[in-house]
Image (cartoon, coloured by chain):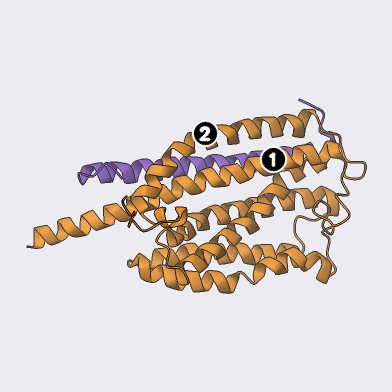
Chain colours: A purple, B orange
C-alpha cells in the first residue's frame, strides 16, 4: 500500500463507503432477483 | 415469387415485448459484470499505485477517482430516467417505465455516494464537510428528487398509472440537471469549473486522467449491469403480480 499522507483517513473512508455502497447495490440486486424468481417458480412459470 | 407481408419491426419495437427483452439481455449480464470487475481492478491499481499526488491537494486527489464517476452517474442516471419518461409519455414503450423504475434507486445510491465522497474530500481541501454552495445544494435536491420518485412508485398498486405520474414528475425534476451542471459557472462556489470536458481540452495531466477515465467507465458499466438486472427483475415481478391476480380470481370463482 502506498503512503497516503496526513489525510489518509479521509481517502480510506471514502473508498470504504463507496465500495460498501456498491456491494450493497449488487447484494440487493441479486437478492431481489432470486426472491422474484423463486416466487415465479412457485406460481408455475419459471420461463420469463 | 412471394411477397413478404410481415411488418418490418425496428429493434426497439422488438424489445417492446418484455419476455423478449429478458431473453435478449440475460446473456449480456455476466460479460458486463466481468468487464466491470476488470475495470474496477485496473482503476483501483491506477488510483493507488500508478498515479501521482496532486501538487496542491496532495493524496486527497485520489478521492476524485470515486467522487467524479459517482457524481457523473447521479446526473447520467437521471438523464436515462428522463428519456425513459419521454418513452412512457410520448411513445408508450412498454419497457420505458420498467427502465424508469429500475434506475431510480440506483440513481439515489450514486447521488448519496457522490455527496458522501464530496464531503470527505471537502474537509481536508476546503476545511469543511458541507457548504451550501450551488453544486452541493442542487445535488442534495437531486437526492431528494430520487427518493421522492422511489416513494411515488411504491405508493401505487397500479404500476401503469404510477408510470404516467412518475414520468411527469421525472420530467419536471429534470430542470435540476442543468442547474447542477452550470451551477459552478452561474454562482460563486467552492467547486472548480469544468476541468475535463472543455473546449480547449482537459486541464489535468494524463497521469490523473487515465485512472479517472478507467473508474468512470467502471462505474458506468456497473450501472449498465445493475440496470439490466433490475429491469429483468421488474419484468418478472410484473409477471408474478399478473399470475397472483389470476390465481386470486380462480380461487374467488
Question: Looking at the figure, which quarter contains the C terminus of chain A?
Answer: top left
Q: Position of residue B68 (x, y in %)?
A: 73, 49
Question: Chain ID for label 2?
Answer: B
- The lab-note entry on whether marks 1 and 2 share a chain reads yes
Between B211 and B16, which is closer to the camera in this rendering?
Answer: B16
Q: Position of residue B182 (x, y in %)?
A: 77, 66
In the image, farthest residue toward the left: B253
Between B159 and B54, which is closer to the camera in this rendering?
Answer: B159
Between B90 and B139, which is closer to the camera in this rendering?
Answer: B90
Nearest-to-viewer mark from 1 and 2:
2
* Sequence-wise first label, 1 or 2: 2
Q: Compared to B139, does A42 lie above or below?
A: above
Q: Position of residue A1 (x, y in %)?
A: 76, 25
Q: Compared to B235, does B82 lie above or below?
A: below
Q: Mark 1 to mark 2: distance in Å? A: 18 Å
Residues packed near mark 1 inside 10 Å, few (<14), some (14 to 19) or many (20 plus): many
Q: Which mark is on residue B253?
A: none
Disc 2 is placed on an element classified as: helix
Disc 1 is placed on an element classified as: helix
Q: Would you name the residue on which mark 2 appears?
A: B31
Q: Do tag 1 and tag 2 residues touch (Cβ < 8 Å)?
A: no
Residues packed near mark 2 inside 10 Å, few (<14), some (14 to 19) or many (20 plus): few
What residue is drawn where x is 36% and y is 53%?
A: B18
What residue is drawn where x is 64% and y is 50%?
A: B113
What residue is drawn where x is 89% and y is 55%?
A: B200
Amino acid at each position: 500500500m502506498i503512503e497516503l499522507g496526513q489525510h489518509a483517513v479521509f481517502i480510506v473512508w471514502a473508498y470504504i463507503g463507496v465500495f460498501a455502497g456498491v456491494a450493497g447495490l449488487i447484494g440487493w440486486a441479486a437478492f431481489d432477483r432470486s426472491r422474484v424468481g423463486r416466487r415465479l417458480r412457485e406460481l408455475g412459470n419459471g420461463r420469463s | 415469387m412471394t411477397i413478404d407481408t410481415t411488418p418490418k419491426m425496428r429493434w426497439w419495437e422488438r424489445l417492446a415485448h418484455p419476455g423478449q427483452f429478458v431473453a435478449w439481455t440475460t446473456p449480456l449480464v455476466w460479460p458486463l459484470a466481468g468487464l466491470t470487475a476488470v475495470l474496477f481492478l485496473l482503476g483501483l491499481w491506477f488510483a493507488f499505485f500508478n498515479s501521482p499526488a496532486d501538487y496542491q491537494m496532495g493524496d486527497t486527489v485520489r478521492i476524485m477517482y470515486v467522487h467524479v464517476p459517482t457524481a457523473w452517474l447521479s446526473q447520467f442516471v437521471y438523464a436515462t430516467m428522463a428519456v425513459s419518461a419521454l418513452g412512457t409519455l410520448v411513445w408508450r414503450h412498454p419497457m420505458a417505465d420498467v427502465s424508469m423504475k429500475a434506475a431510480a434507486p440506483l440513481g439515489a445510491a450514486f447521488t448519496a455516494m457522490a455527496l458522501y465522497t464530496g464531503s470527505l474530500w471537502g474537509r481536508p481541501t476546503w476545511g469543511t464537510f458541507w457548504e451550501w454552495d450551488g453544486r452541493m445544494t442542487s445535488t442534495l435536491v437531486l437526492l431528494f428528487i430520487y427518493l421522492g420518485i422511489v416513494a411515488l412508485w411504491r405508493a401505487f398498486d397500479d404500476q401503469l398509472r404510477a408510470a404516467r405520474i412518475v414520468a411527469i414528475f421525472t420530467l419536471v425534476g429534470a430542470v435540476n440537471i442543468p442547474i447542477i451542471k452550470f451551477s459552478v459557472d452561474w454562482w460563486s462556489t467552492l467547486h472548480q469549473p469544468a476541468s475535463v470536458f472543455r473546449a480547449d481540452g482537459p486541464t489535468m495531466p494524463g497521469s490523473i486522467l487515465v485512472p479517472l477515465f478507467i473508474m468512470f467507465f467502471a462505474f458506468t458499466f456497473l450501472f449498465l449491469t445493475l440496470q439490466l438486472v433490475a429491469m429483468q427483475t421488474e419484468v418478472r415481478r410484473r409477471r408474478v403480480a399478473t399470475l397472483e391476480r389470476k390465481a386470486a380470481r380462480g380461487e374467488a370463482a
